[in-house]
Structure formats: C-alpha cells, structure tokens
C-alpha cells in the first residue's frame, strides 16, 4: 500500500478515535456541552477576548455555527459578551470564571485520558509525536488559509 494511502487511513481512524476520546473527556470532566462547544471554549481560552467572526475564523468554521455554540455556552454561564474597547459598536467574547474552570477541568480530563491511552510510550515518544502533530497542524492551517484566500477572490 502506498504511504499516502496508509496515512489517509490512519488519519481517518484517528479522527474516529478522537471523537470517542472527546466524548470521554466531556463525561469524565462532568461537562454538559457538545464537543463543538468544548472546542469553542478551548480556543477562546487561548485567544482571549475576541470577536465572534475572529473566533469562527480561528476555528475554521462558519460564524453561524459558532454563534449557536456561543449562545449555548452563554446560557451555561461560561462565556460572556462585552463591548469591544476598540470599536464600541462591536462585541467581544470572553470566558467567565466558570468558563475558565470548565476549560481547566477538560484539560485535566484530557491529560488523564491520554496517559491511559499511551502507557507504553516514553516521554521522548510523546514529545516526538507532539512535534510531528504540531508540524502537520501547521501545514493544515496553511492549507486552510490558502483555501480561504481562494474563496475570497472567487
């Protein structure tokens, strides 16, 4: 079998496995939200206060999809909107204290799940895998940026 065909198969298997891991992480952390909502929380935690359109772009998603998740997260008390200090007509999203607690709980549950899933890997193995995944993620992000630019000019 060709190397790229094997890679494609392994990536498909990985995506299915990650869906299961994400469900387990949400359950273990006791967080009642969709996996997409957890992704929004995590990205918002990394970005800090941000406009919805910028958050959607960072997630590579349509703003309407992100808006639906944000509304649910607001109802849970994990996200708030505030006036953008640079443009008072706009709003920024930010995590509440409760939202930061949820992100921390998800992070702890994710670490525990990964520790259980990788008992035979050394710290060096984990670091090498992480470095390779970071490189792949960087390439994927570059591809998304190029695709978005092509769509804007079309």
Image: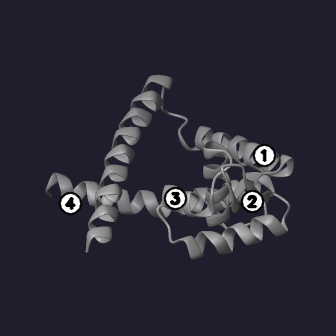
In the rendered image, residue 112, in percent from the top left (x then y), is placed at 67, 41
Query: Is residue 33 positioned above or below 126 on the image?
Result: below
Which residue is pictured at 50% across the width and 67% down the height? 61
Mark 2 or mark 3, which is nearer the start of the sequence?
2
Mark 4 or mark 2, which is nearer the start of the sequence?
4
Q: Secondary structure at mark 3?
A: helix
Compare residues 27 and 1 and report the one nearer the observer. Answer: 27
The residues tagged by marks 2 and 4 sit, at their Cα atoms, a distance apart of 34 Å
Give the residue pinned by disc 2.
27
Which residue is pictured at 45% across the width and 28% down the height? 127
Give the residue pinned by disc 4.
5
Q: Tell me if mark 1 has few (under 14), some (14-19) or many (20+) residues whose alpha carbon lies within 10 angstroms of its own.
A: some
Give the residue pinned by disc 1.
100
Mark 1 or mark 3, which is nearer the start of the sequence?
3
Q: Tell me if mark 2 has few (under 14), some (14-19) or many (20+) residues whose alpha carbon lies within 10 angstroms of its own.
A: some
Comparing labels 1 and 4, the label whose residue is closer to the camera: 1
State left or right for residue 107 relative to residue 76: left
Q: Secondary structure at mark 4?
A: helix
Query: Is residue 116 positioned above or below 16 on the image?
Result: above
Give the residue pinned by disc 3.
59
The quarter of the picture where residue 135 lies is top left
In the rendered image, residue 41, in percent from the top left (x then y), is placed at 68, 54
In the rendered image, residue 66, in percent from the top left (x then y), is placed at 61, 69
In the rendered image, residue 11, in percent from the top left (x then y), is placed at 36, 57
Mark 2 or mark 1, which is nearer the start of the sequence?
2
């Amino acid at each position: 079998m060709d190397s790229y065909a094997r890679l494609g198969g392994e990536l498909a298997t990985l995506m299915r496995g990650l869906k299961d891991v994400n469900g387990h992480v949400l359950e273990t952390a006791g967080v009642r939200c969709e996996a997409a909502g957890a992704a929004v929380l995590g990205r918002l935690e990394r970005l800090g206060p941000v406009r919805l359109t910028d958050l959607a772009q960072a997630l590579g998603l349509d703003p309407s999809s992100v808006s639906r998740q944000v509304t649910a997260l607001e109802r849970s008390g994990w996200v708030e909107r505030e006036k953008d200090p640079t443009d008072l007509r706009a709003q920024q999203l930010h995590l509440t204290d409760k939202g930061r607690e949820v992100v921390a709980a998800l992070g702890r549950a994710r670490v525990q799940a990964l520790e259980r899933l990788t008992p035979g890997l050394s710290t060096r193995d984990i670091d090498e895998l992480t470095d390779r995944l970071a490189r792949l993620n960087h390439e994927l992000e570059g591809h998304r940026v190029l695709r978005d630019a092509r769509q804007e000019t079309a």
